Image (cartoon, grey):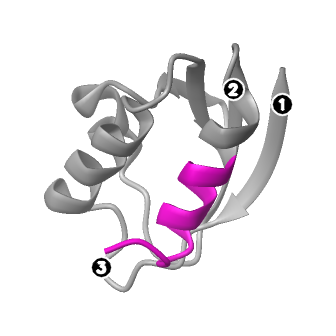
Amino acid sequence: MIKKSIRINLESGLEARPVALLVQEASRYESTIYIQSGERRVNAKSIMGMMSLGLDNGEKLEVSAEGIDEQAAVDGIERFLGGKVA
């Protein structure tokens, strides 16, 4: 299992469209991926779960992935949340 703390660098935060794109990014990987903010932990492949976090630009969260492509999954999520993927 890999865990990494990431700061969101998306101008609009994680509103509906960015959440949908994040879930799409997470779904590219076989690994189980969770995003935790405070005490809340949700499956990164769940649109409803991700929307429930209500994350904004500049917030810090923790991404954890476990599986065959866990490093690639964390790297992909980090790129997306860092604003490096459109």
Mark 3 or 1, closer to the camera: 1
| Residue 85 placement, left or right of 37 | left
Taking the view exactly as shown, the residue that stands out farthest to the bottom is 11
x then y, percent, for residue 45: 37, 26
Q: Residue 12, which numbered label?
A: 3
Secondary element type, mark 1: strand
The residue drawn where x is 51% and y is 17% is 30
- Density class for disc 3 (Cα within 10 Å; few <14, some 14-19, many ≥20) is few
**Residue 68 visible, this orientation:** yes
x then y, percent, for residue 20: 21, 47
x then y, percent, for residue 39: 66, 31
Q: CA distance from mark 1 to mark 2?
A: 5 Å
| Residue 24 placement, left or right of 6 | left
Question: Vertically, is 65 above or below 50?
Answer: above
Question: Vertically, is 32 above or below 11?
Answer: above
Q: Is residue 83 inside the magenta stretch?
A: yes
Q: Dots 1 and 2: beta carbons under 8 Å?
A: yes
Span of residues in magenta: 75-86
Residue kind at label 2, given as amino acid type: Ala
Q: CA distance from mark 3 to mark 1?
A: 27 Å
The residue drawn where x is 33% and y is 61% is 14
Q: Which residue is under mark 1?
A: 2
| Residue 86 placement, left or right of 68 | left
